């Protein structure tokens, strides 16, 4: 049986999505993308420093990747909508990772504003991938507003704390008929595997890869963990038990 | 003549088109998006618009982000 991730009708070749922030160079970022075979890659928009170097990040992202600009920096729906439109005007397609944050300490997303922006952008034909707190009612509202997936956090951005929201994520997986993609907080491949094993459809990682000592190797490690976790979920893990059960036959002939 | 560019007041020569400004600042024209007075421009519009007093220009490009 083929195991395909479909988002907005498009077949996504890898369940490992990679962010491009914090790499020490674009050349290194490119190698990390290649070593992970990520298909969806996020980028951000920023004001151009006048007189700054003219290296264009897009020249370092493989052509077959889907570029997903984020709206980081937006503090409310209106700012996010404006950023999404600018990103689309740059000619990089309709994908947008909607990210609305108005809390600088924990960088937690604002679900209410995110729902509002999702509604507007989905109507304009964007493929909206909203970063959100894992709340069931809000996830339903996001779906109704036209989101193409739901991207709840595992733990706050850049903290490497892993799946602190696990119980809430499992509710979304059970109840929301959209791809559930854990975005933010995954610090180790084992945590990515854990997310996939419990039934998440994909994960997005940036900091843990970009700030590893060897980002290229870490990108590969995450991609493998995602694949392993997905296979484990499909294989349906056996229940855990309190008491031991022998895995070899106890024939008893020594007694 | 002063225009507000990326949040800063910038003194400009009269009669400067947006494209001329971008070239003057050695911007990579392939890599930027320009918003002029809250309207997103297509690159082919850059040449025909002359910057005026109190214009607001945002010049944006992609960078790494998660």
Image (cartoon, coloured by chain):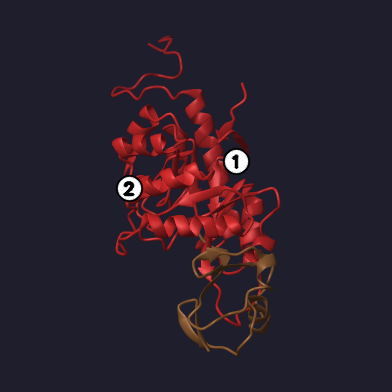
First in sequence: mark 2 or mark 1? 1
Judge by depth and name the residue closer to the eye, A41 or A113: A113
Task: Determine the image quadrant of residue B47.
Answer: bottom right
At a point 32% along the width and 48% down the height, the residue shown is A111
Task: Determine the image quadrant of residue A180.
Answer: top left
Q: Colour of chain A?
A: red
Mark 1 burial class by Cα count in 10 Å: few <14, some 14-19, many 20+? some
Please provide percent x and percent y for residue A169: 35, 37
- In which chain is the residue bearing label 1? A
* Mark sitting on residue A111: 2
Please provide percent x and percent y for residue A60: 67, 61
At a point 69% along the width and 54% down the height, the residue shown is A62
Please provide percent x and percent y for residue B28: 67, 73
Residue labelled with disc 1: A14
- In which chain is the residue bearing label 2? A
Judge by depth and name the residue closer to the eye, A12 or B31: B31
Judge by depth and name the residue closer to the eye, A191 or A7: A7
């Amino acid at each position: 049986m083929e195991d395909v991730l479909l988002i907005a009708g498009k077949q996504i070749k890898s369940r490992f999505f990679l962010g491009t922030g914090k790499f020490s160079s674009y050349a290194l970022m490119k190698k990390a993308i290649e070593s992970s075979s990520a298909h969806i890659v996020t980028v951000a928009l920023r004001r151009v420093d006048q007189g700054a170097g003219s290296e264009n990040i897009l020249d370092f992202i493989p052509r077959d990747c889907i570029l997903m600009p984020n709206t980081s920096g937006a503090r409310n729906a209106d700012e996010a909508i404006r950023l999404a439109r600018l990103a689309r005007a740059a000619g990089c397609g309709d994908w947008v990772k909607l990210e609305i944050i108005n809390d600088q300490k924990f960088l937690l997303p604002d679900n209410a504003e995110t729902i509002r922006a999702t509604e507007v952008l989905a109507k304009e034909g964007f493929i909206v991938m909203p970063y959100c707190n894992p709340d069931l009612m809000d996830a339903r509202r996001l779906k109704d507003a036209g989101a193409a997936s739901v991207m709840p956090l595992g733990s706050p951005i850049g903290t490497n704390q892993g799946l602190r929201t696990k119980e809430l994520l499992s509710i979304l997986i059970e109840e929301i008929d959209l791809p559930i993609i854990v975005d933010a907080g995954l610090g180790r491949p084992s945590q990515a595997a854990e997310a996939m094993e419990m039934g998440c459809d994909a994960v997005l990682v940036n900091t843990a890869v970009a700030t590893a000592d060897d980002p290229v190797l870490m990108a590969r490690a995450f991609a493998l963990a995602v694949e392993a976790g997905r296979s484990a979920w499909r294989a349906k893990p056996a229940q855990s038990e309190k008491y031991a059960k022998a895995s070899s036959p106890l024939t008893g002939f020594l007694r | 003549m002063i225009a507000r560019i990326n949040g800063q007041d910038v003194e400009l020569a009269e009669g400067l088109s947006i494209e001329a400004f971008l070239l003057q600042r050695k911007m990579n024209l392939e890599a930027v998006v320009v918003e002029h007075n809250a309207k997103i421009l297509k690159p082919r519009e850059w040449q025909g618009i002359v910057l005026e007093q109190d214009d607001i220009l945002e010049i944006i490009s992609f960078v790494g982000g998660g």
